[in-house]
Image (cartoon, helix red, strand yellow):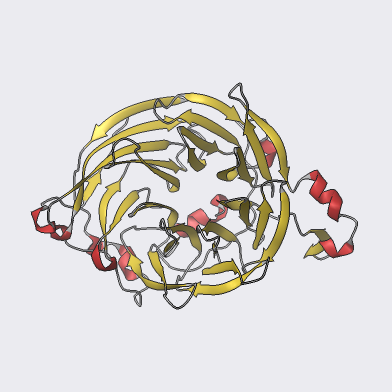
């Protein structure tokens, strides 16, 4: 999503699609790193029936329980840690790998110890011309970062615990193999051509499945890369407008979400080596900003500027999804989604993070509303604790320049009727 262009529109209450003009590059100003921690408790209950998101997509039924007595889980305690890499600049994306938290602040990537919040390294700090980092992922011991300057950069952690730049995709070798033949060029605009292996606009999302890397861009294309030799294997004109999100299931089915309000499903047909379009999912009334899959890939979640999270489930007789309902509660655009086990986390322009729990018969309840950010929540990660099965760590990156991490304890009641806990809502006061 183009921060410079979509934000004013996403803050409005209508459901119209959003424009995507090219955003200007940001300047590079280094700041200081600070951290603090605090604990908080529930303060109030946010009634779902009063939320404006209930007015969107009236033809799609709501999937959440509306009454607290139906809850089977509650959140008993929350501890929050705050990190501000460069307070004057937004956090554009975050990612977790092992015990490390990666946070992009404009062009540079800050690496933190997840347990202590200590800053371990900063890389790409000299690459201000690359524009903001839009996505971070990991494959074969390497770090891949997607940038506003149309490139994907590859990094590797050295023995000295520093990050070295390896190459940019497409690589020089890949360009040299293809630049001679005219068939390898595509028209970008009148009298301007470029190699089909190159993205023509900001790379907005990355996903990994086994040895393949999938990238999407505002240039409306999906590209597939082989991690072993960094070669581009395929480029697909996937949508009619900018692509904002990509996710891939364990069986290598790829889902892309776009400003054209569509989600498209891509897979390899039997006996074929190339990806092709399997289905187009249409239900959102505005730009699709975020996608997430559950653990086995049978449920897809999509978030858009229409303020709703749609739930899609795979039909028995097909390899595509059908919408089953919507999760409503956010007051403004959904910007990010992440799923761990049967928990879904959503971040929004309304500056909150919601935790959703899947219950019986495909119903959901909102376990918590986490507050404290001063601007839209742009990126989320969630990790289950390795030692405590009832603990989940949630990190959120916001356009206010802050990363907040919550340690959330989930408690299960013996029966839904034994719960007297309302949907919890925290106001986090950090000095």
Which residue is situated farthest in the top direction here? 160
Q: Position of residue 90 (x, y in %)?
A: 50, 40
**Number of numbered labels in the structure image:** 0
Q: In which quarter of the image is the N terminus?
A: bottom right
Q: Is residue 370 left or right of residue 149?
A: left
Q: Nearer the viewer, residue 97 or 70?
A: 97
Can you tell which quarter of the image residue 65 is in?
A: bottom left
Q: Which of 201 and 408 is in front in this view?
A: 408
Q: In this view, does 171 lie to the left or right of 320?
A: right
Q: Which of 159 and 393 is in front in this view?
A: 159
Q: Is residue 143 left or right of residue 393?
A: right
Q: Residue at x 52, y 31 (%)?
A: 111
Q: Position of residue 285 (x, y in %)?
A: 46, 71
Q: In which quarter of the image is the C terminus?
A: top left
Q: Where is residue 216 in the image (x, y as percent from the top left)?
A: 62, 57
Can you tell which quarter of the image residue 398 is in?
A: top left
Q: Is residue 276 left or right of residue 354?
A: right
Which residue is situated farthest in the right direction here? 180
Whether residue 301 is visible here, answered yes or no, is yes
In the image, residue 79 above or below residue 274 = above
Can you tell which quarter of the image residue 390 is in?
A: top left
Q: Where is residue 411 in the image (x, y as percent from the top left)?
A: 20, 45
In the image, residue 164 above or below residue 232 = above
Whether residue 32 is visible here, answered yes or no, is no
């Amino acid at each position: 999503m183009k921060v410079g262009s979509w934000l004013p529109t996403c803050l409005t209450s209508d459901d119209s699609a959003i424009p995507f003009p090219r955003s200007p590059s940001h300047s590079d100003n280094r700041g200081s790193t600070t951290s603090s921690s605090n604990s908080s408790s529930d303060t109030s209950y946010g009634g779902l029936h009063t939320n404006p998101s209930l007015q969107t997509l009236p033809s799609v039924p709501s999937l959440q329980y509306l009454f607290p007595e139906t809850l089977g889980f509650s959140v008993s305690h929350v501890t929050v840690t705050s990190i501000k890499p460069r307070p004057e600049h937004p956090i554009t994306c975050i990612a977790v790998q092992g015990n490390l938290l990666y946070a992009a602040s404009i062009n540079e990537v800050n690496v933190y110890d997840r347990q202590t919040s200590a800053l371990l390294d900063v890389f790409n700090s000299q690459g201000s011309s690359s524009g903001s980092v839009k996505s971070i992922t990991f494959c074969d011991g390497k770090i891949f970062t997607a940038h506003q300057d149309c490139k994907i950069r590859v990094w590797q952690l050295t023995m000295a615990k520093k990050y070295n730049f390896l190459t940019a995709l497409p690589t020089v070798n890949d360009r040299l193999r293809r630049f001679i033949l005219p068939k390898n060029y595509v028209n970008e605009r009148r009298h301007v051509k470029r190699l089909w292996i190159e993205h023509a606009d900001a790379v907005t999302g990355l996903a990994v499945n086994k040895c393949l890397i999938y990238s999407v861009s505002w240039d409306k294309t999906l590209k597939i890369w082989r991690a072993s030799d960094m070669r581009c294997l395929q480029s697909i004109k996937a949508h009619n407008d900018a692509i904002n999100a990509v996710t891939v299931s364990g069986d290598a089915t790829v889902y892309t979400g776009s400003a054209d309000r569509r989600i498209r499903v891509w897979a390899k047909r039997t006996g074929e080596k190339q990806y092709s379009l399997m289905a187009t999912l249409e239900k959102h009334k505005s730009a699709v900003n975020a996608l997430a899959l559950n653990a086995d890939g049978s449920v897809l979640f999509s978030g858009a500027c229409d303020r709703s999270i749609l739930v899609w489930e795979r039909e028995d007789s097909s390899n595509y999804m059908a919408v089953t309902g919507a999760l409503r509660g956010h007051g403004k655009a959904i910007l990010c989604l992440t799923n761990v086990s049967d928990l879904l986390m959503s971040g929004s322009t309304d500056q909150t993070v919601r935790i959703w729990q899947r219950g019986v018969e495909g119903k959901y309840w909102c376990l918590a509303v986490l507050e404290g950010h001063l601007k839209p929540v742009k990126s989320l990660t969630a990790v289950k604790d390795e030692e405590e099965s009832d603990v989940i760590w949630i990190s959120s990156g916001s356009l206010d320049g802050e990363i907040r991490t919550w340690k959330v304890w989930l408690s299960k009641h013996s029966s839904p009727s034994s719960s007297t806990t309302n949907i919890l809502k925290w106001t986090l006061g950090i000095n």
